[in-house]
Image (cartoon, grey):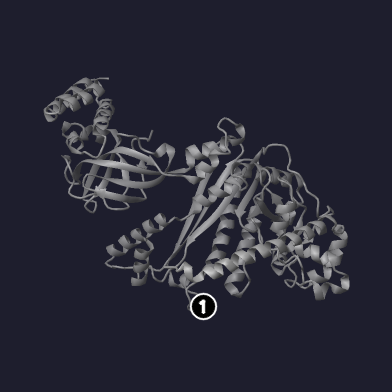
């Protein structure tokens, strides 16, 4: 897992819109962020930060690895160094998809939840949000609003995963945090009981 | 757009000619193989070709270095690489482009340090961005070309290898083999002051590898040239015909690669040769004369032929050369005949199109902050648009 304060430099934003963006990157396997990780990217010439959630990670075709797979046998000591090189060093070509959750202007400590005024531009760094920042972002269940409304992402998996991870940041009040999130979802998804039940069951488990 | 129908006749002629060439080459190959097997002993060969070697650069043949018969096939040692570090280095560049938004060039060298200890290898990259006009234009005012950039890159590769070799030797007493992807013998013509300075810097870096306790190794994959075939032809000539007929080699439709792919067993290497060229004499003057052998790195029937070049002082170290042979065989077994450490060094060094786009966007941003709004030329913009089709 990525250390929470680790900075991941992204090569190029491939596609971006208000609801999220996809970046192409070549980073070593241990640095690839996980599903449901909060990330931050500067927007509006650096005057604001967009926060979003990683909802998809795609490994791109890697002919070099395909070539190796035919000759290298895991467990064979002759190939220990090669296998460790592939796992620990080698830049894996990945596409990381991020859904927008909210944004914050640099001179304002409060987050505005929902879609940002502008998507991030090319060549900005994506930073994995540290625990303190995740606690601030998730302190209001409103952070889920943009996710619930986004039809292009696996929101029903992403929301419970994010809530369960964030709950670990509230020692002693995790149950209360989840309960409040559940109440918010019940209000927001009152007209879609099937979807609501699906998400709540995931949280309950 | 290419109108294939207009060159249909040429395509057919090309195919027929290739078939004829193939038959000629097969005959020549059989002849070369016979000459190789029945070659004179090495002492005789050295004496025989001496008149040719005295005319530096006029004869492009090889000279055997040891008493081992030139048709000997030295098998790969059985033992696995041990107490050994293999460093691979490679370089890449962005050429200066007068149609780009700004004139610059970039060199990048990547290296992989592969220790036979079970650990993950270490990786290393260094890069140089040049934008000063004095570096971009030659003395005649022309934009520097691929040769100038190639020379600088070759020097940087060897300097990086020397640095890493020194660091590695401080870290561990293990033997260090420092591989570069390409010949060890300086491959550029020594024309003008800057070429001489580059060669001097290269030889200095080569000496640096030696002084650090490493062995510099040039790895030439699928080598061109026919120094061995020239030697075999010279062996067929009477001494009085050497000067007049050395240029009439009937094996000239082949390269050494063809003969080795046909005759050298998988895993085996030939004996040592050297090339009596003026450049190699410059190397020798600095104690870095280059010797070479051919090696078949295919795992079975196949043709993964490489030319391995090392300094003569290293070739005399039998233990080091046995380690090199075994390490190359192991490295190549991972990637079907090409050393893993060099493939990875290439990957580390490579400046991709994406990298170039990112670099130019960063430069453009920096220029914009200084109030300069640079654009690529209209020709470059149109090519970019058309290239997307």
Residue ID at (35%, 39%): A57
Tell me the SS state at disc 1: loop
Residue A140 visible in rendering: no
Quarter in which the N terminus of chain B is drawn:
bottom left
Residue B346: % across, % down: 53, 52
Q: Which residue is mark 1?
A: B139
Q: Furthest residue to the bottom? A: B140
Residue B310: % across, % down: 69, 54
Residue B206: % across, % down: 64, 57
Q: Quadrant of residue B3?
A: bottom left
Q: Which is nearer the eye, B261 or B226?
A: B261
Residue A12: % across, % down: 34, 51
Question: Would you place residue A107 above or below residue A187 in this image?
Answer: below
Q: Which is nearer the eye, B173 or B183?
A: B183
Give me the chain letter of mark 1. Answer: B
Q: Which is nearer the eye, B260 or B239?
A: B260
Q: Viewed as shown, does residue B292 lie left or right of B127?
A: right
Question: Would you place residue B59 above or below residue B119 in this image?
Answer: below
Quarter in which the C terminus of chain B is drawn:
bottom left
Q: Which is nearer the eye, B280 or B92?
A: B92
Residue ID at (76%, 67%): B250
Q: Residues within 10 Å of mark 1 (few under 14, many from 20)?
A: few
Residue A20 visible in rendering: yes
Q: How many marks?
A: 1
Q: Viewed as shown, does residue A204 lie left or right of B233?
A: left
Residue ID at (64%, 59%): B183
């Amino acid at each position: 897992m990525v250390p929470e304060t680790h900075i991941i430099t992204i090569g190029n934003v491939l596609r971006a819109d208000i609801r999220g963006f996809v970046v192409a990157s070549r980073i070593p396997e241990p640095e690839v962020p996980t599903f449901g990780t909060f990330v931050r990217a500067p927007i509006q010439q650096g005057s604001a930060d967009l926060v979003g959630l990683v909802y998809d990670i795609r490994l791109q075709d890697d002919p070099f690895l395909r070539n190796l797979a035919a000759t290298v046998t895991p467990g064979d000591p002759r190939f220990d160094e090669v296998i460790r090189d592939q796992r620990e060093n080698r830049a894996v070509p990945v596409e990381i998809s991020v859904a927008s959750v909210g944004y914050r202007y640099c001179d304002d400590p409060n987050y505005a939840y929902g879609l940002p005024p502008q998507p991030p531009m090319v060549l900005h760094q994506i930073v994995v949000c540290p625990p303190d920042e995740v606690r601030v972002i998730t302190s209001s269940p409103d952070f889920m609003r943009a996710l619930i409304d986004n039809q292009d992402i696996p929101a029903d998996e992403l929301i419970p995963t994010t809530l369960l991870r964030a709950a670990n940041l509230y020692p002693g009040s995790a149950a209360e945090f989840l309960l409040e999130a559940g109440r918010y979802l019940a209000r927001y998804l009152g007209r879609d009981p099937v979807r609501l039940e699906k998400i709540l069951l995931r949280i309950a488990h | 757009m290419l109108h294939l129908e207009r060159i249909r006749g040429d395509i057919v002629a090309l195919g027929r000619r290739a078939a004829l060439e193939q038959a000629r080459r097969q005959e020549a190959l059989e002849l070369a193989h016979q000459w190789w097997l029945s070659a004179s002993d090495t002492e005789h060969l050295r004496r025989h070709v001496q008149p040719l070697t005295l005319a530096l650069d006029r004869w492009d043949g090889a000279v055997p270095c040891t008493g081992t018969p030139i048709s000997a096939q030295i098998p790969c040692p059985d033992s696995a690489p041990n107490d050994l570090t293999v460093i691979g280095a490679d370089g890449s560049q962005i050429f200066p482009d007068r149609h780009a938004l700004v004139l610059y060039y970039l060199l990048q060298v990547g290296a992989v340090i592969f220790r036979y200890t079970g650990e993950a290898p270490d990786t290393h990259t260094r890069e140089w961005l040049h934008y000063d006009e004095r570096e971009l234009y030659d003395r005649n005012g022309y934009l520097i070309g691929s040769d100038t950039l190639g020379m600088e890159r070759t020097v940087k590769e060897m300097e990086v290898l020397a640095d890493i070799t020194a660091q590695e030797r401080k870290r561990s007493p293990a033997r260090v083999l420092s591989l570069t992807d390409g010949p060890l013998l300086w491959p550029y013509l020594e024309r003008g002051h800057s070429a001489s300075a580059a060669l001097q810097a290269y030889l200095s870096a080569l000496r640096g590898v030696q002084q650090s306790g490493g062995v510099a190794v040039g790895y030439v994959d699928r080598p061109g040239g026919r120094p061995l075939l020239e030697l075999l032809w010279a062996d067929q000539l009477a001494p009085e015909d050497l000067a007049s007929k050395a240029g009439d080699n009937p094996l000239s439709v082949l390269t050494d690669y063809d003969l080795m792919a046909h005759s050298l067993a998988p895993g085996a290497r030939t004996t040592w040769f050297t090339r009596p060229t003026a450049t190699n004499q410059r190397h020798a003057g600095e104690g870095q004369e280059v010797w070479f052998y051919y090696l078949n790195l295919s795992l079975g029937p196949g043709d993964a032929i490489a030319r391995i070049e090392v300094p003569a002082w290293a070739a005399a170290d039998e233990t080091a050369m046995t380690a090199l042979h075994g390490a190359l065989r192991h490295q190549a077994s991972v990637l079907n005949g090409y050393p893993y450490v060099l493939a990875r060094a290439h990957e580390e060094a490579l400046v991709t199109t994406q990298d170039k786009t990112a670099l130019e966007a960063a430069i453009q941003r920096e220029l914009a902050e200084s109030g300069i709004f640079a654009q690529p030329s209209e020709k470059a913009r149109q090519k970019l648009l058309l290239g997307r089709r």
